[in-house]
Amino acid sequence: MVGKSVVAFLRDCFDTHQVPADLNHTVLVLIPKIPYLETFSQFRPISLCLVVYKSLMKVIVILTQEVIHSMSKKIGRKGLLALMINLVKAYDHLE
């Protein structure tokens, strides 16, 4: 069960349309895949972020999916537009 303070914080973010700047600080940790490392590709990157930030992003994803789903059900209506943006994970390009 999610604490009342977490729910209140998430609601506040949506009501004010603002997320505190220090909330999305993430630490990237490189875990070795093999005992003797030679390249960055032999590391497994793990991102550590706050649970509240992860929860907020999950809610945004769910809401976005619902909006896109409801837009796809409206046939023949003009003025609807959805943009799909592919955000590449930062660790996919470590060299």
Image: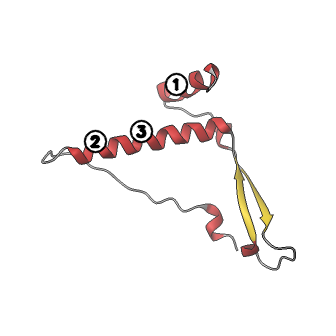
Judged left or right of residue 21, residue 76 is: left
Is the C terminus in the top left, top right, bottom left or bottom right quadrant? Answer: bottom right
Determine the image quadrant of residue 2: top right
Would you call the spot at circle 1 few (<14 residues within 10 Å), some (14-19), or many (20 or more)? Answer: few
The residue pinned by badge 2 equals: 70
Query: Of the residues tagged 1 and 2, which is closer to the observer?
Result: 2
Provide the secondary structure element on which disc 3 rests.
Answer: helix
Q: Is residue 80 visible?
A: no
Label 3 neighbour load within 10 Å: few <14, some 14-19, many 20+? few
Camera-side mark, 1 or 3: 3
Judge whether 25 appears above or below 42 on screen. Answer: above
First-in-chain label (1 vs 2): 1
Amino acid type at image mark 1: Arg
Q: Is residue 14 left or right of residue 43?
A: left
As drawn, the residue found furthest toward the right would be: 36
SS for dot 2 = helix
Alpha-carbon span between mark 1 and mark 3: 13 Å
Decide: is 87 above or below 37.
Answer: above
* Whole-percent x, y for residue 10 in the image: 55, 28
Check residue 38 in the rendering and tell me which mark sits there, or answer none: none
Determine which residue is flagged by label 1. 11
Q: Quadrant of residue 65?
A: top left
Under mark 3, the amino acid is: Leu
Query: Of 79 and 43, which appears nearest the observer?
Result: 43
Looking at the image, is mark 1 or mark 3 earlier in the sequence?
1
In the picture, which quadrant includes the N terminus?
Answer: top right
Q: Which residue is mark 3?
A: 63
**Three-letter code, disc 2:** Ser
Compared across the picture, whether 36 is left or right of 28 comes to right
Q: How far apart are the alpha carbons under marks 1 and 2? A: 22 Å
Q: How far apart, in angstroms, are the residues tagged by discs 3 and 2?
A: 11 Å
Q: Quadrant of residue 51?
A: top right
